[in-house]
Amino acid sequence: MKVVKNSKEMLRISSRIKESGKTIGFVPTMGYLHEGHISLIRRARRDNDLVVVSIFVNPIQFGPNEDYKKYPRNLRQDRKIARDKGCDIIFCPDAKQIYPKGYATRVKVSGLTSYMCGASRPGHFEGVTTVCAKLFNIVRPDIAYFGQKDYQQAVVITRMVKDLNMGLKIKTMPIVRERGGLAMSSRNEYLSPQQRRDAAALYESLKEAKKLIRSGCRESAGIKAAMRRMISKKPGIHIDYITIADPETLRSQNRLGAKSLIALAARIGRTRLIDNVLVDCE
Ligand code: PAF
């Protein structure tokens, strides 16, 4: 497995791969790789001739009071995991490689970024789309892989790729969960054992929502109230939002549609967690 730190070198390598007619599968990450990332690497391995994983904790997608500085990092462990799972190239630039002196360009998707996490984390998605646009230009993937846990991120990036004719495919892969149901996230590392047990209430509330829907409930207010009741049994959890929304436009639905996204964000201590399920009411 090759480790590349320099953007120009990465672009040279990916251009050579493309000229040889081989396909590139790309898994963009901020590192601290877990089973969720591994599922993306495995899928990229299956679909493509070569697999590139990027590891870059992107400063511009964090707000001023967020966890950029303490975001978990372990490049040595990540390199081992990536190599063992079949990655061919790790691209791990530093911030100066991605945002050199004089850097002045941002990519912003409007509309979709005003809901859900976009409302509570101003500027976050602009940081994500900016770095992904850059990474796509440097790595030149045929397919890039994202996890459904960051559902809104995947929708926003898919929109950007379409709007800017970027010529790659975005594949969104299912959420991988811990044994207790908590969605895998590098931020789970911050949780104490008790907080980790409590955090399972988030997925329990999503399962409760699905149960209500299966029994015929279609009013969003009632479903969201039941989810809040369930989560409030754990006093350490503070809900940021619960939404039932159209999976494509992300606009909230008062009544469930043929397809709906049920998504939530919550804080446990200083840790912000997100989770979601897609439901089919047809
Ligand atoms: O999902 C993430 O880890 C990040 O938001 C991403 C897509 C790597 C961009 O920094």
Image (tube, rainbow, N blue to C red):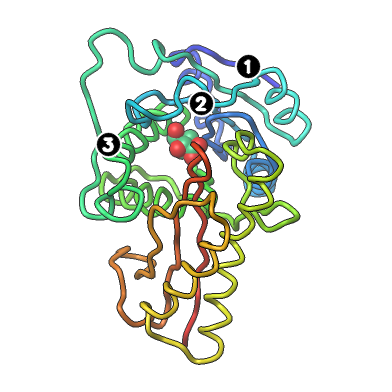
Pick the residue in front: 201 or 209. Answer: 201
Residue 143 visible in the current orientation: no
In front: label 1 or label 2: 1
For residue 146, above or below residue 74: below
Q: Which type of secondary structure does the marked residue at label 2 adopt?
A: helix
For residue 189, above or below residue 100: below
Q: Which type of secondary structure does the marked residue at label 3 adopt?
A: loop
Q: Which residue is mark 2?
A: 14
For residue 40, above or below residue 261: above
The residue positioned 49% from the left and 80% from the top of the image is 280
Amino acid bearing label 1: Val
Pick the residue in front: 169 or 99. Answer: 99
Query: Residue 35 appears in which quarter of the rendering?
Result: top right
Q: Are marks 3 and 2 in contact (CB under 8 Å)?
A: no
**Few, some or many residues within 10 Å of mark 2 (<14, 14–19, 20+):** many
Give the image location of residue 26, x and y in percent.
54, 37
Pick the residue in front: 263 or 12. Answer: 263
In front: label 3 or label 1: 3
**Disc 1 and disc 2: Cα gap in Å?**
13 Å
Q: Which residue is mark 3?
A: 123
Give the image location of residue 172, x and y in percent.
52, 54
Describe residue 11's horizontal placement relative to residue 79 as left or right. Answer: left
Describe residue 83's horizontal placement relative to residue 226 as left or right. Answer: right
Looking at the image, tell me whether mark 1 or mark 2 is earlier in sequence order.
1
